């Protein structure tokens, strides 16, 4: 059974279609990178997959269940799109504990799950005695990504995870995502503007343009060139 | 889960920037709150005497009941203007494994423990103890209170439903206010009396306590309505109060004639019209123009000078004081952008200066019809206007460099204390005291008109020297700009 199945989905704002995808299937364990220019509809698609926007037409199924009708998908889906996903008046510790509680994780479990992230955090997240809202954008992103992966979800959805991060953190995040993919067999759905990062992490690349899928390909050694050729206008 | 959400709510309010403002503001705010609450409490204790005086032929309980319906209508109107349900607060939970139904129950019940729902107890309870308990016994009195409270909660949920349905259209709110006012006038002229209906309904309740079931059922119904509506619309873009946004680029051609200064003024005007908080500053300042009606008809103030000077300064300068007290915080969101552009501090303040002068002039012109109360009023207002544009404007600028707190313009303005610091209150003092101090010696010597003349003359002198003074202001700004910019980035 597919992990995510998008069927005939459309979103229109004031007569302007921003997303129009007849079909997109993501199988369990697959790693899909979504690329496209600004306004291509990446985030809108993510929001519809996460039932945060009501599609104008069509449905999204998670393990065969319509996400708009049942909430079961929330148990095995981890996501971070933007700062709106964070409860920003909590400290990172409080936020992680809260997410842990939702998944019935003990304090020890949470600490253990965070262990692989400590490098990524670079000592700037935990024990800072600061609220999330007072962190920089990059550090907020680190909190969001860690919180999304905390529950060992079966599918992890991240919007622009590399944006706002320093080069070291980008590389660490790349290794983290590979670790999650290989060790935990997580399904990954990632959007990025960074072509080289995304092809390194994802085995499948989908190009979105003006809300429509224009290419859907397996990653090979020629993918980067193909992508660069595509985006060179 | 529910307790966790409540704990989060508690953290949110305790950690909100409202509580992190200075001690001085907290004390002043606290003082105002206590003052208002005490006023209501006193009103509650003496309302029966008041009613007996106004309606000597009526039982105070009947008279009180007669006003309840109006109370609910006015309450609803006030809520339309001030209250909102922060449903978006559940946005960070939507992608987490928390049941939507639970989030909605939470967000709805969160609206109940609000000052809007409970302040009226300060009037109701003393009245209940004093009048209802002796007349009807504790049981019936308690039922009466329960019914009133249920109706207040009903208002709470009716508002939440309609505000979400009808969008926060200010015209509709205004129309509703006019209807309520019309009903009151109709009552006053004995055309249609809602008071009789209200008294009859609550009289019925006192005679038949089971009638309390009616408001209870209504409340349950409206709660259910809200619940179903929100459950069907748990999407952030649908939950937010609808706003019809269509941004139209405007060009104020007239201002282009004034070069750089004109462009900066145009920018300032756009900033004002495109943000709620700044707009409300304008409306508040317009309201102040009616200040004269409170003071001028009063013989006591008419004969003196001090009070009239105060009124004149306030009326012709209120916009400048209100808006100016947040310079340069209005630009806090894009302050770094301003600093990195080719705009000198002198230019910046020059634009503000030429922005305030016409605003004060307009205010002065609007106050001209107060000549009805005598030419003395006009003379004093003229002196006050000159003083505002020649002296007070620079006092405002002088204090502006102390503003290092950021203002989030997108937040609404009612009860918004963001950016308000102790310096604001300190600043208001010289603005008002200075002209009074200048006038005082002349007043004592018995030559008051010389005092008025001196106030005006000082204004003219300051105005004539504006370039020199603005240069000093700009210098002071330069010396403080890093501090200001750092403050705004937080």
Image (spheres, rainbow, N blue to C red):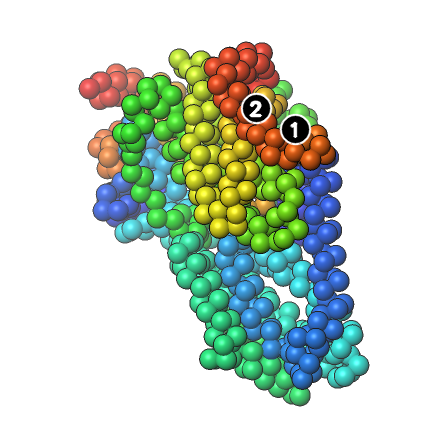
Comparing B149 with B92, the one in front is B149
Answer whether residue B224 is visible to the viewer in this image. no
**Element on which disc 1 rests:** helix
State the mark number for residue B438. 1
In this view, B416 is above or below B50: above
- Direction from residue B241 to residue B326 in the image, left or right: right
Rendered residue at 46%/80% (across/down): B191
In this view, B118 is above or below B60: above
In the displayed image of the protein, which residue is found farthest to the left?
A233
Say which residue label 2 marks. B458
**Element on which disc 2 rests:** helix
In this view, A175 is above or below B451: above
Where residue B103 sits: x, y (%)? 54, 54
Q: Assess disc 2: are there few (<14), some (14-19) or many (≥20) residues with their C-alpha within 10 Å of its C-alpha.
A: some
Where residue B357 sits: x, y (%)? 45, 29
Disc 2 and disc 1 in contact, CB within 8 angstroms:
yes
Comparing B359 with B9, the one in front is B359
The mark nearer the N terminus, 2 or 1, is: 1
Rendered residue at 23%/47% (across/down): A15
State the mark number for residue A184. none
Q: On the rendered image, what quadrant is the C terminus of chain B found in?
A: top right
């Amino acid at each position: 059974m597919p992990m995510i199945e998008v069927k005939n989905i459309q979103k229109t704002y004031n007569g302007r279609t921003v997303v129009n995808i007849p079909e997109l299937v993501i199988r369990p364990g697959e790693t899909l990178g979504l690329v496209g220019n600004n306004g291509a509809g990446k985030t809108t698609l993510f929001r519809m997959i996460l039932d945060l926007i009501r599609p104008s037409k069509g449905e999204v199924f998670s393990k065969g269940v319509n996400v708009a009708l049942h909430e079961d998908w929330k148990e095995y889906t981890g996501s971070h799109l933007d700062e709106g996903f964070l409860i920003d008046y909590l400290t990172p510790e409080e936020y992680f504990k809260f997410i842990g509680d939702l998944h019935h994780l003990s304090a020890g479990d949470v600490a253990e799950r965070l262990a692989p992230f400590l490098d990524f955090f670079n000592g700037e997240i935990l024990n800072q005695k600061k609220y999330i809202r007072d962190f920089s954008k990059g550090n907020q992103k680190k909190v969001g990504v860690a919180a999304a992966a905390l529950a060992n979800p079966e599918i992890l959805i991240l919007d622009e995870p590399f944006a706002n991060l320093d080069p070291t953190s980008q590389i660490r995040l790349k290794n983290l995502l590979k670790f999650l993919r290989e060790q935990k067999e997580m399904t990954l759905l990632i959007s990025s503007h960074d072509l080289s990062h995304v092809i390194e992490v994802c085995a499948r690349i989908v190009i979105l343009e003006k809300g429509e899928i224009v290419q859907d390909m397996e990653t090979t050694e020629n993918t980067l060139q193909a992508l660069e050729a595509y985006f060179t206008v | 889960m529910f307790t966790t959400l409540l704990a989060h709510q508690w953290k949110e309010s305790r950690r909100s920037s409202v509580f992190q403002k200075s001690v001085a503001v907290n004390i002043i705010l606290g003082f105002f709150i206590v003052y208002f609450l005490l006023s209501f409490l006193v009103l509650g204790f003496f309302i029966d005497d008041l009613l007996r005086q106004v309606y000597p032929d009526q039982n105070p309980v009947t008279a009180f009941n007669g006003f309840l319906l109006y109370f609910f209508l006015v309450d609803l109107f006030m809520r339309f203007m001030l209250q909102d349900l922060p449903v978006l607060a559940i946005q960070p939970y939507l992608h987490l494994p928390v049941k939507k139904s639970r989030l909605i129950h939470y967000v709805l019940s969160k609206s109940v423990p609000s000052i809007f729902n409970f302040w009226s107890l300060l009037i109701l309870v003393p009245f209940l103890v004093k009048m209802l308990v002796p007349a009807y016994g504790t049981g019936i009195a308690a039922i009466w209170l329960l019914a009133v409270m249920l109706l207040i909660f009903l208002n709470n949920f009716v508002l939440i439903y309609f505000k979400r349905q009808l969008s926060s259209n200010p015209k509709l709110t205004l129309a509703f206010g006019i209807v309520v006012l019309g009903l009151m006038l109709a009552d006053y002229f004995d055309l249609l009396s809602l008071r009789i209906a209200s008294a009859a309904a609550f009289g019925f309740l006192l005679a038949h306590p089971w009638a309390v079931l009616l408001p209870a059922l209504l409340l349950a119904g409206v709660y259910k309505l809200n619940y179903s509506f929100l459950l069907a619309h748990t999407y952030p873009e649908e939950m937010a109060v609808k706003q019809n946004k269509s941004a139209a680029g405007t060009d104020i051609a007239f201002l282009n004639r004034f070069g750089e200064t004109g462009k900066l003024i145009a920018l300032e005007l756009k900033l004002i019209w495109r943000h709620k908080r700044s707009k409300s500053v304008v409306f508040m300042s317009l309201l102040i123009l009616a200040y004269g009606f409170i003071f001028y008809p009063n013989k006591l103030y008419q004969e003196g000078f001090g009070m009239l000077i105060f009124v004149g300064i306030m009326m012709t300068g209120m916009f400048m004081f209100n808006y100016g007290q947040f310079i340069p915080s209005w630009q806090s969101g894009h302050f770094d952008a301003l600093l990195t552009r080719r705009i000198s501090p002198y230019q910046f303040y020059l634009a503000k200066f030429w922005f305030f002068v016409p605003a004060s002039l307009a205010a002065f012109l609007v106050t001209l019809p107060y000549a009805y109360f005598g030419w003395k009023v006009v003379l004093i207002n003229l002196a006050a206007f000159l003083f505002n544009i020649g002296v007070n404007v620079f006092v405002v600028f002088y204090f502006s460099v102390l503003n290092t707190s950021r203002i989030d313009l997108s937040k609404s303005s009612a009860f918004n204390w963001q950016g308000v610091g102790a310096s604001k209150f300190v600043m208001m003092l010289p603005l008002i005291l200075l002209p009074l101090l200048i006038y005082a010696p002349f007043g004592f010597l018995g030559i008051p008109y010389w005092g008025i003349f001196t106030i005006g003359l000082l204004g003219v002198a300051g105005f004539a020297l504006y370039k020199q003074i603005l240069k000093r202001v700009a210098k002071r700004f330069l010396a403080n700009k890093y501090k200001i910019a750092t403050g705004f980035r937080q």
